Image (cartoon, rainbow, N blue to C red):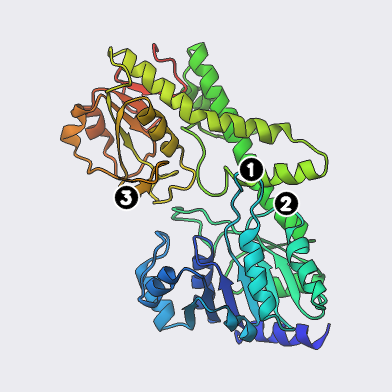
Amino acid sequence: MNNYYRQLREKIKNHNAKVGVIGLGYVGLPLAVELSKSGYVVYGIDLDNKKIDQLLNGNSYIMDISNEEIEFITKSCNFTPTSNFEIIKDLDAVSICVPTPLTKFQEPDMSYIIAAMNEIKKYMHKGLLITLESTTYPGTTEELIEQELNNQGYIVGDDYFLCFSPERIDPGNTYYNTRNTPKVLGGTTKGCTKLGVDLYSNFIDTIVPVSSPKVAEMSKLLENTFRSVNIAFINEMAMLCDKLGVDIWETVDAANTKPFGFMKFTPGPGIGGHCIPLDPMYLAWKAKGSNFFSRFIDTAQEINKQMPEYVYNKVSNALNTHQKPIMGSRVLLLGMAYKPDIDDLRESPGLEVFELLRDSGACVEYNDPHARSFTDKYGEKVSSVELEYSRLSEYDCIILITNHKAYDSNMVVKNSKLIVDTRNAFKEFDDPKIIKIGVDIKK
């Protein structure tokens, strides 16, 4: 191995390496925190000056990271938030943690990765370790990073080192975090992989080396496409059970008693978050480029996108049993975040349920103890209303979208006239005013 490799490996081993994290969102900030705690000099780079100011003042904007942690790493560790990419020229390693959304045509939007690489190219120097963490299609690391730097005369494995290591952040998970979640990592060369493992193993308990960036890229898409397909399957079974007069929730619990060959998934109002709704589309897009069409992925997307409308129809039928039309009915959605006990509204199915009901003339409000407001399709701000259990009877229907721990099930059932439960949150109650998805309304 050459001098750049040996020098960098020694710096990483002795915690003398200076590390940058580009993108300080749900992925990048937790990564920067763990890097800082492990003793490295860390620069968090983000173009959003509001984020930089908050961090400099010891404030976190992510629920999983406390203000105390930010204050600790900025004052007691060597963590510096900045919007100045010029610092890259002084770094030994940089991790790219930028968003990878979809375009309006449902194709991969690589603009954030390209923008990050444009900045890296300005301040590129020999001996730099670059790790891409953003979820993306197989081949991205080679196409958008290796080829770009090769065009500048840099040889991967000799002049610089390149890895892909997909993020596995699960917002709101109180057990699994950046440190104790196993991390897949694939380098362009064996030396690249060794350096990546050396760095990440200092602050992550388990590193899973693979043979190439493509394998690492594919593994992340496989994980999330697996979830998407299985969620779609159980959502379809919920709609089928509704037609057959069978309780999907009891059925799933019965099937789950089999100690082998079954993995429990439960239905819901749809899929949300940045990963599960988007990642399969990256894989489908790449597959089509290779003249391969994945029917599973397309069908799963179609089914999961149907669920908000299914919930809407469930609400309509439930109101009909009370001789109420949707138009003019007062409806309250409990929860708007895409999963419990977080404030993340990205791709939340509750947003679509809200719009469908409002477009049909319902007077719709929502409560979420974590997600305090959102911007509707007209660009108007919609704010969470205060939850007063004693006033739930003023609503014609309560829809449980997200089963936050803050909600008192007894009080909701006691004070509501009609409940549509999309999460089986009221399974302990045998009350005819509770209507579940996946269960015939007459049952």
In the displayed structure, does residue 231 sit left or right of residue 367? Answer: right
Give the image location of residue 236, x and y in percent.
57, 25
Give the image location of residue 21, x and y in percent.
57, 72
Give the image location of residue 434, x and y in percent.
32, 22
From mark 1 to mark 2, how far is it between C-alphas? 22 Å
Mark 1, other Cα within 10 Å: few <14 / some 14–19 / many ≥20: few
Q: Is residue 336 above or below residue 158?
A: above
Residue identifier under label 3: 372
- Along the viewing direction, whichever of 309 and 403 lies nearer the viewer: 309
* Residue sitting at x 60%, y 84%: 15
In the displayed structure, does residue 284 sit left or right of residue 413? Answer: right
Q: Nearer the viewer, mark 3 or mark 1?
A: 1
Residue 256 appears anywhere in the view = no
| Residue type marked 1 | Phe
- Earlier-in-chain disc, 3 versus 1: 1
Q: Are marks 3 and 1 in contact (CB under 8 Å)?
A: no
In the displayed structure, does residue 343 sit left or right of residue 396? Answer: right
* Residue sitting at x 80%, y 38%: 292
Q: Is residue 148 above or below residue 410?
A: below
Residue 247 appears anywhere in the view = yes
Q: Quadrant of the N terminus?
A: bottom right
| Residue type marked 3 | Arg
- Residue 105 circle label: 1
* Residue sitting at x 42%, y 39%: 351
From mark 3 to mark 1, how far is it between C-alphas? 30 Å
Q: Quadrant of residue 194?
A: bottom right
Q: Quadrant of residue 159?
A: bottom right
* Residue sitting at x 58%, y 56%: 168
Residue identifier under label 2: 218
Q: Are marks 3 and 2 in contact (CB under 8 Å)?
A: no
